[in-house]
Image (tube, rainbow, N blue to C red):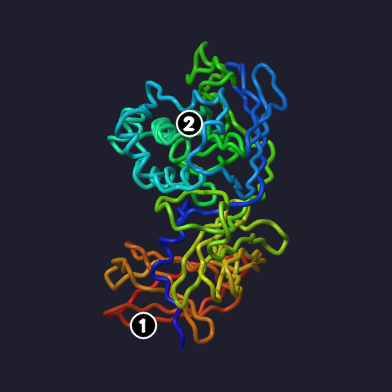
Amino acid sequence: MRLFRSFLLLALLLPGLALPETMILEGKHRVVLDIINPSGIKKIPDYQNANFSQKVIETKPWTARVEIIITLEPFRSQAGYPLADYQVPEQFQVFLKPEAEVQSSRPEIQRQARELVGYASTETDAVTRVADWMADNIRYEVNTPQDALSVYRNRAGSCAGQTRLMMAILRAAGIPARYARGFLPPGGQWGFDKEYWGVSIKSGGFHAWIEVYYPDQGWVFSDILHSLNFVDPHHLLFQIAGTNLNPGYETTVSGEDGNIRMEEGTSWTIFSEDDQSRVVDALPEPKRPLLSLRTGPQATCAVYGVAKDGAGKPVKSGSLIVWEGDQGKGYPLDRKGRFGVGGLNRGTYFISVRAEGFAEAKKNVTFEQPEAKKLDFVLEPGGVIYGRVTDASGQGISGIYVYLWQGGSGKGFPTDEDGNYKVIGCSAGTQRLSVEGPGYQKAEAKIEIKPGARVEKNWVLKR
């Protein structure tokens, strides 16, 4: 008899789980934002660089409609490192110089730059080394000085401070870099945390990110809190410092000195969205999750796809589970039922999808070489069994398992600290459950499940 235990499963299936590797994306993502501001909208610029396009489609005194498109093609810069003088146009050499808050000439910054990029042979490698170091060594903190040198010494900074430090290190390394200002639309609330392929943006509202120059690609955005060599299409750009793009813009919450005034009355709506991005690979560094574009050959195996119900509608709030033996590791589905998992080794994996109201769907996938495979699921109606496990005194029993049996195999669902449990992925029909734990007698029950049903079953265990 083979017993499927899931001791780690609940912790891994919590919403907003950060994926453990740098996830490599491909595809395209288009968002059209509608912005309504009771104080009036003055200026949102059009802008385009290597893989980012922002265009104001329509504007009125109090409203604007803006289209943002990102193209997630493999990043193929062949620029060597260090850059030769002739590779940086004269008008861009200002972005190699120190500034009051970007102290690229200070000895500490110069030394760190040499340590990070001294052995890099391409600009892509040099920028990646700096980004990886930043991700793993600088924590997010708002209430601290935000100039580059202070962030370096304190190992802490906000989006603004971390952007300035990355700019300073890159400029010290002879790589042009500049400061982008913008806004992360909150989508129904003022300030937010959002997920994009499992990676969390740690701030909301006004935001800063970096733009780096590659001789053969042009200017390229990165967001050191989120992504390398691109930014997601929820980055609404207002200004790039040191350029003629909206030069009068000032970062203000409200008032006459801001080109666009932001306040609690401002509303942001996604008018339309076409998200064709997908996870196709993963890298082990940095330790803090980032998203990136492909810069080299396929490194690992990956699986991506979508989970839908019988009517073809996306299954939301579910989880994809990758099983290795009797241990399962879970990844949340996004709001469109999509999933993407990279970093898998060669071999055969048992993969399932669980969601409330559906029976668990299962498939096998085999990887003979590093590659990305598409794997879609159709979920049949099912149910949920939930309840509480207590002793004779009514005290909840934590850390034991409620098992759902299918033939001779059982899958375990642990109780929480109060003895509560939830069995997700039950098929319609008669289900056999059991509960057991050290020091308690085993208890069993048969429960009838109707499609879409939630059935409560409480247990009192005897010693």
N-term-proximal mark, 1 vs 2: 2
Under tag 2, what secondary structure?
strand
Camera-side residue of 82 and 34? 82
Camera-side residue of 445 and 412? 412
Report x, y in % for residue 118. 39, 45
Is residue 316 among what the camera can see? yes
Camera-side residue of 262 and 231? 231
Is residue 188 among what the camera can see? no
Q: Amino acid at mark 2?
A: Ala
Q: Amino acid at mark 1?
A: Lys
Q: Is residue 26 above or below residue 104?
A: below
Q: Residue at 54% across / 14% down in the picture?
A: 248
Within 10 angstroms of label 2, few (less than 14), some, or many (20 or more) residues?
many
Which residue position is annotated with label 2? 208
Camera-side residue of 132 and 226? 132
Q: Is residue 85 above or below residue 136?
A: above
Within 10 angstroms of label 1, few (less than 14), some, or many (20 or more) residues?
few
Report x, y in % for residue 115. 35, 44
Q: Is residue 46 above or below residue 292?
A: above
**Label tally:** 2
Report x, y in % for residue 377. 65, 66
Q: Nearer the viewer, mark 1 or mark 2?
A: 2
> Residue 442 — which label?
1
**Residues at marks 1 and 2, CA–CA distance in whole angstroms:** 57 Å
> Residue 72 — which label?
none
Q: Residue at 66% across / 34% down in the picture?
A: 53
Under tag 1, what secondary structure?
loop
Quadrant occupied by the C terminus:
bottom left
Q: Residue at 55% across / 53% down in the picture?
A: 24
Report x, y in % for residue 398. 32, 67
